[in-house]
Image (tube, grey):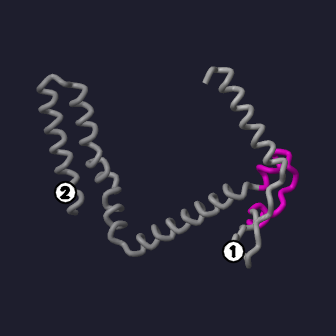
Amino acid sequence: MLAETVCSAVSAAGLGIAAVTAYRKRFLTALRTAAYSLIPVGLVMTGAVGWLANTAFSPLAWAGFGVLGASWALFALVRAVEHRRGTRTARAAAGAGPAAPVSPSASAPAPVRSADRGSRPAAAPSTSAKSSSDDFSDIEAILKKHGI
């Protein structure tokens, strides 16, 4: 009963503002204000306000909203995991064939610990040293070409 009274008062105030706006010769704004102010009365007449008031104060309804939230969270979790792993259908459609199960340790390199009983890290291959010096010589050649 209180919600219906509040909605009626809001509508009456909105229609008053619309009348003042129309008096100032701003007819489109007045029509828009009148349209917005009729919405609360329409909601009261359809019974939506009573339903909403009964739902807002019902513990069973709030438990239902909690269950819906948990369902949404589970859907989001499944979506995130599928996005991270990649779906089997997406891999099959891409032509990769049947997807094998992905284990996290298969793609991650083993951690390197430098404090393993005095062991030294493996020496870098000489080809990488040559390629890095070749990279610098290419950069030097480009800089010389531009006069830097």
Label 1 is placed on what type of residue? Answer: Ala
The image quadrant that residue 88 belongs to is: bottom right
Of marks 1 and 2, the one in the foreground: 1
Q: Position of residue 14 (x, y in %)?
A: 19, 41
The image quadrant that residue 37 belongs to is: top left
- Quadrant in which the C terminus is drawn: top right
Residue 103 visible in the shown view = no
Left/right placement of residue 7 relative to residue 140 reads left
Please state which of residues 20 and 38 is positioned toward the viewer in this rendering. 20
The image quadrant that residue 137 belongs to is: top right
Q: Which mark is on residue 115?
A: 1
Q: Residue 33 lies in magenta, yes or no?
A: no
Q: Which mark is on residue 14?
A: none
Left/right placement of residue 87 relative to residue 37 reads right
At 30% from the left edge and 51% from the top edge, which residue is drawn?
A: 45
Q: Position of residue 51 (x, y in %)?
A: 35, 62
Q: Position of residue 94 (x, y in %)?
A: 81, 45
At 31% from the left edge and 51% from the top edge, which residue is drawn?
A: 43
Residues under labels 1 and 2: Cα distance? 76 Å
At 26% from the left edge and 42% from the top edge, which residue is drawn?
A: 38
Q: Residue 107 lies in magenta, yes or no?
A: yes
Label 2 is placed on what type of residue? Answer: Thr
Q: Which mark is on residue 5?
A: 2
At 74% from the left edge and 66% from the top edge, which residue is drawn?
A: 104
Please state which of residues 97 and 55 is positioned toward the viewer in this rendering. 97
N-terminal-most mark, 1 or 2:
2
Q: Residue furthest right?
A: 97
- Quadrant in which the N terminus is drawn: bottom left
Instruction: Give the structural element (helix, strand or loop) at label 2.
Output: helix
Bounds of the magenta span?
88-108
Instruction: Give the structural element (helix, strand or loop) at label 1.
Output: loop
Left/right placement of residue 47 relative to residue 88 reads left
